[in-house]
Amino acid sequence: MDTLTQEKTWSYRKDNQSTVEVPESKLKELISSGQLSPDTLVWSSGMTEWVKASSIGSLVPDYDLKPHPWLRFFARQFDLMIYNFFLSLFIVMVSIFLPSLEILYTGISGMFLLQIITVLTWIVPETILMAAFGMTLSKWVFNIKVRNASEAILSLGESFERSLGVAVKGLALGIPVFYLVTMLMSYNKLENTGRTSWDREGNFKVYHGKIGPIRMMAIFGLACIYILFRIITVLTM
């Protein structure tokens, strides 16, 4: 009871009109879950004026659960691009001994087939990376991390479950047209409910942290590589 009575109490302005009083832990929860913006005006006993929650370091965590569909989209696209690049090199080298594999990098049909293979086989390395580090390379660049209900890094089984869910429900296994439909559906789900179907079913949490100058430069570099890669892909196909 002593701990509860000592917890600091904050007031925040709802819709910049009515005032709501809550314990500090509750206010943190509202901000981290995205129910309140970091720009929400807050006040506590001893303060001379209302200030933005973002100006109070103890209220705004390093990571929050507010959905960022486009950041997640680009992070996944960059992961797939990098993996597709190395997979393509491997296929080209193997095709020296197995000429029949040339179908995977010639023509439009080859491009679509390689896309499906990329999405399907990416499940394995992604599962391993997520279980080991809680993020992939692109997720690190975009400062995105995934945790389970216990706030721990996903186990190997949980990582596989989530990667498979993304491949099937989010990317439609890379199948043309269906791929675009499922991505749009996932985008709407994330925007409207704050969670994708695979994260809700597995009770996974996706946290977004601040993107500093170094990460911004890395994102710019990846974007340039991505555009160049797509141009080369189209020209060679």
Image (cartoon, rainbow, N blue to C red):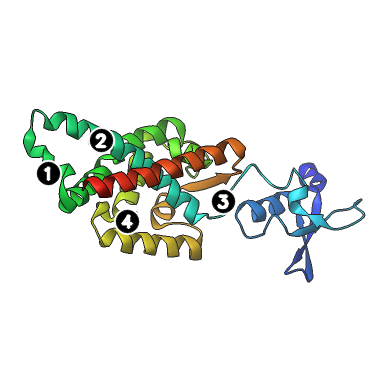
Q: Position of residue 3 (x, y in %)?
A: 77, 42
Give the distance between the C-alpha atoms of the residues marked 2 and 4, in whole angstroms. Answer: 23 Å
Give the distance between the C-alpha atoms of the residues marked 3 and 1, in whole angstroms. Answer: 43 Å
Q: Dot 3: what SS?
A: loop
Check residue 65 in the rendering and tell me which mark sits there, or answer none. Answer: 3
Q: Dot 2: what SS?
A: helix
**What is the three-letter code of the residue carrying label 2?**
Leu
Mark 2 or mark 4: which comes first in sequence?
2
From the image, tell me which residue sits under label 4: 169
User: Mark 2 against mark 3, which lies toward the viewer?
Assistant: 2
Is residue 203 something one can see in this rendering? no
> Splitting the image into 4 quarters, where does residue 126 fall?
top left
Q: Dot 4: what SS?
A: helix
Q: In which quadrant will I find the N terminus?
A: top right
Callout 3: 10 Å neighbours few (<14), some, many (20+)?
some
Give the distance between the C-alpha atoms of the residues marked 4 and 1, in whole angstroms. Answer: 27 Å
Residue in the picture at 48% in, 55% down: 70
Mark 2 or mark 1: which comes first in sequence?
2
Mark 4 or mark 1: which comes first in sequence?
1
Give the distance between the C-alpha atoms of the residues marked 2 and 1, in whole angstroms. Answer: 14 Å
Mark 3 or mark 4: which comes first in sequence?
3
